[in-house]
Amino acid sequence: MATAARRGPYFCGVDAAMDVVAGKWKSLILWELDHHGTRRFAELRRGLPGVSEKMLIQHLREMEEDGLVHREVYLQVPPKVEYSLTEHGVSLNAALAGLGTWGTERIRRIGAAKVFTGDEHDHS
Amino acid sequence: MATAARRGPYFCGVDAAMDVVAGKWKSLILWELDHHGTRRFAELRRGLPGVSEKMLIQHLREMEEDGLVHREVYLQVPPKVEYSLTEHGVSLNAALAGLGTWGTERIRRIGAAKVFTGDEHDHS
DNA sequence: TCAGGTACTTACTTGTGGGTAAGTACGTCT
DNA sequence: AGACGTACTTACCCACAAGTAAGTACCTGA
């Protein structure tokens, strides 16, 4: 088992939420799915420049387990799987909006570089 | 150097904000300082059950470098150092409020345990 | 005298998140 | 025939976040 356990005793709400968003790509996945409504595996991979297939699946599985993501499998060949957000995923993404604007401000302040992703990743 | 670098190219605002709050105790430190206004090193240590002194300092130094925390040293013996939030720290903490309530909801949903900290850690 | 308080620093170790790369099973396009 | 697409799985490796423990230098109270 790659990652798991968690759901440990939390100090507070922020702690519990962070537990679920922790992971290099989770917030991006959240955003992609919220933005596009529904995405296939390969579409997500292409949407997140730099993810390895292993990490993508691992994160998707964890998020499914955490009730953030819904996984719809179409029994056909070639395989087709569609990912989308559950209501909890949607609300979590909404809860991240505040962080998003703060972070955008910070990027502006310190003049950090931004990765170009094709379509702009900004929760605004 | 324990930790550093970062400030790397970001995908989006959330990414940039997460970079700064990443770290097991950072959100807790943020909350403690926001709640109490100003705290000494030993007070923080006692307020965060489980932190090692090494991690506390490491996180405080990083947060100082990131402009979230102000460190005031009083040249006296025995030493006295006071930590407080800068305006950016305060606004970051405010930006975490949404996450906090979402997380509290999640704790209720999954019935997770909560660490008792003496005074309740809840951004509400 | 010595435990305990202030605020750290330093060295060593472990756990694991994440990266790399290859394999699988099947189908279509050229 | 071979390249490429779907959606994964598996094995291996490494860097680093975090934990443990001890040391430093000084002062206070019992």
Image (cartoon, coloured by chain):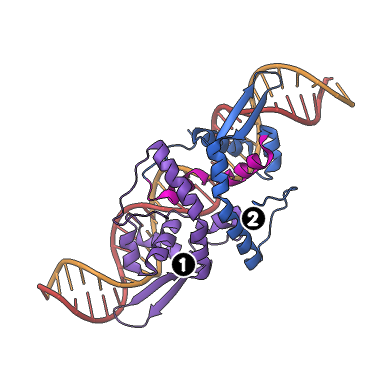
Chain colours: A purple, B blue, C red, D orange
Magenta range is B10-38
User: Could you say which disc has been placed on residue A120 in the image?
Assistant: none
- Which amino acid is tagged 2? Tyr
Q: Is residue B35 above or below residue A122?
A: above
Few, some or many C-alpha atoms within 10 Å of disc 2 (few <14, some 14-19, many ≥20)? Answer: many
For marks 2 and 1, the one nearer the N-term is 2
Q: Which residue is mark 1?
A: A61
Q: Nearer the viewer, mark 2 or mark 1?
A: 2
Q: Percent x, y for residue A34?
A: 42, 64
Whether residue A3 is visible to the viewer of this picture, yes or no, is no
- Which amino acid is tagged 1? Arg
Few, some or many C-alpha atoms within 10 Å of disc 1 (few <14, some 14-19, many ≥20)? Answer: some
Q: Does residue A29 show up magenta in the picture? A: no
- Residue B48 in the figure: left or right of residue A95: right
User: Could you say which disc has been placed on residue A10 in the image?
Assistant: 2
Q: Residue at x 66, y 34 (%)?
A: B38
Whether residue B17 is visible to the viewer of this picture, yes or no, is yes
Q: Percent x, y for residue B96?
A: 56, 50
Task: Look at the numbered disc 2 and give the secondary structure of its residue.
Answer: loop
- Which quadrant of the view contains residue D27? top right
Task: Look at the numbered disc 1 and give the secondary structure of its residue.
Answer: helix
Q: Does residue B18 show up magenta in the picture? A: yes
**Letter of the chain that mark 2 sits on in the rendering:** A
Q: Residue at x 56, y 55 (%)?
A: B98
